Image (spheres, rainbow, N blue to C red):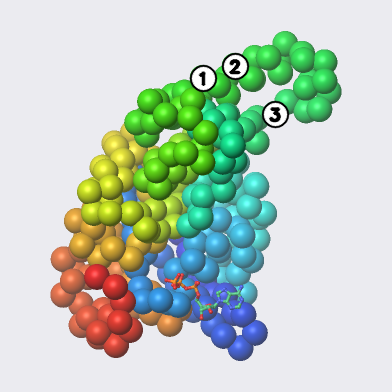
């Protein structure tokens, strides 16, 4: 197990968005979180990455209590995330977008940058090499010199993956990675997630596309009104009465 939550709870005023959730993220697996709209999935993600501080409960990473640690400290432990919307510099090339993303994780300071010390030059080269490597991994080498604004939606999603991968993460959180793209492109991104796992990276994602998630995920947790109502393999989830009722009542998309 790579990450674990114990009785994780988040309240916004009178609303309990995540309620008493025990969950484990299995190392080297594709872990999925599903649930009807407003079930608390994004809030749960934000608690794991340190974006939100829990009202109650704990988050563990490799057995270490990381509850209440700020997001940058959690990121440094090897936890990366992508967001629903891609924050790319549209005028800059795909390669530069990834280099800048990677630089945020390297240690050169302003002094190094101004005097262009050997360490700075070394790190600049390292960032560039890393960016090229991850762009090759997400199969975008052919568009790396194009402005990010000119590539397709699916390619932008691959850039978002590349940005997360450039930090050499152990686990990547993907918030609806295939939202807004067609079924063929969805399959391409699903293969990319499988490729990440083959490289030893743990994947945890939120997804609305049920067919895809049932095929792809090793393990699924279902949230409904902030509570965990089921956890298990695709088969276990598909046959779970509470899940069927939540989806029939909640009108979630197929
Ligand atoms: N910052 C916030 N302040 C107040 N309420 C919030 C906040 N963030 C989320 N909520 C509420 O918490 C509940 C869970 O929201 P959340 O976005 O986590 O659900 P979700 O499962 O990700 O939904 P969706 O599938 O629609 O993205 C909702 O009722 C939402 O309105």
Kindly tell me whether residue 101 is visible in this rendering: no
The correct choice, above or below, for 227 with respect to 207 in the image is: below
Residue at (26% x, 59% y) in the render = 213
Q: Which residue is mark 3?
A: 107
In the depicted view, which residue is nearer to us: 231 or 91?
Answer: 91
Q: Residue furthest front?
A: 150
C-alpha span from label 3 to label 2: 13 Å
Which of the two marks, 1 or 3, is nearer to us in this view?
1
Label 3 neighbourhood size at 10 Å, few (<14), some (14-19), many (20+)? few
Q: Which residue is mark 1?
A: 129
Decide: marks 2, 1 in contact (CB < 8 A)? Answer: yes
Spot occupied by residue 66 in the image (x, y as percentages of width and height): 59, 55
The correct choice, above or below, for 101 with respect to 225 in the image is: above
Label 2 neighbourhood size at 10 Å, few (<14), some (14-19), many (20+)? few
Taking the image as shown, residue 194 lies to the left or right of residue 3, namely: left
C-alpha span from label 1 to label 3: 16 Å
Taking the image as shown, residue 186 lies to the left or right of residue 92, namely: left
In the depicted view, which residue is nearer to us: 92 or 205?
Answer: 92
Q: Which residue is mark 2?
A: 125
């Amino acid at each position: 197990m790579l990450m674990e939550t114990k009785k994780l709870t988040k309240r916004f005023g009178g609303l309990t968005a995540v309620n008493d959730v025990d969950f484990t993220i299995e190392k080297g697996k594709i872990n999925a979180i599903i649930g009807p709209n407003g079930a608390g999935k994004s809030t749960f993600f934000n608690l794991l990455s340190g974006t939100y501080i829990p009202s109650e409960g704990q988050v563990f990473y490799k057995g270490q209590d990381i509850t209440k640690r700020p997001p940058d400290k959690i990121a440094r432990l090897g936890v990366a995330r992508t967001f629903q919307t891609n924050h790319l510099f549209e005028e800059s090339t795909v390669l530069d977008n990834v280099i800048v993303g990677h630089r945020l994780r390297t240690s050169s300071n302003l002094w190094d940058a101004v005097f262009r010390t050997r360490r700075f030059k070394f790190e600049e080269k390292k960032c560039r090499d890393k960016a090229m490597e991850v762009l090759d991994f997400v199969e975008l080498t052919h568009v790396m010199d194009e402005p990010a604004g000119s590539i397709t939606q699916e390619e932008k999603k691959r850039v978002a993956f590349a940005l997360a991968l450039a930090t050499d993460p152990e686990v990547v959180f993907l918030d609806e990675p295939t939202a807004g793209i067609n079924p063929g492109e969805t399959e391409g991104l699903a293969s990319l997630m499988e490729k990440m796992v083959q490289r030893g990276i743990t994947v945890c994602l939120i997804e609305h596309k049920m067919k895809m998630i049932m095929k792809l995920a090793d393990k699924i947790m279902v949230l409904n009104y902030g509570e965990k109502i089921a956890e298990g393999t695709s088969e276990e989830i598909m046959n779970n009465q509470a899940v069927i009722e939540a989806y029939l009542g909640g009108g979630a998309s197929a």
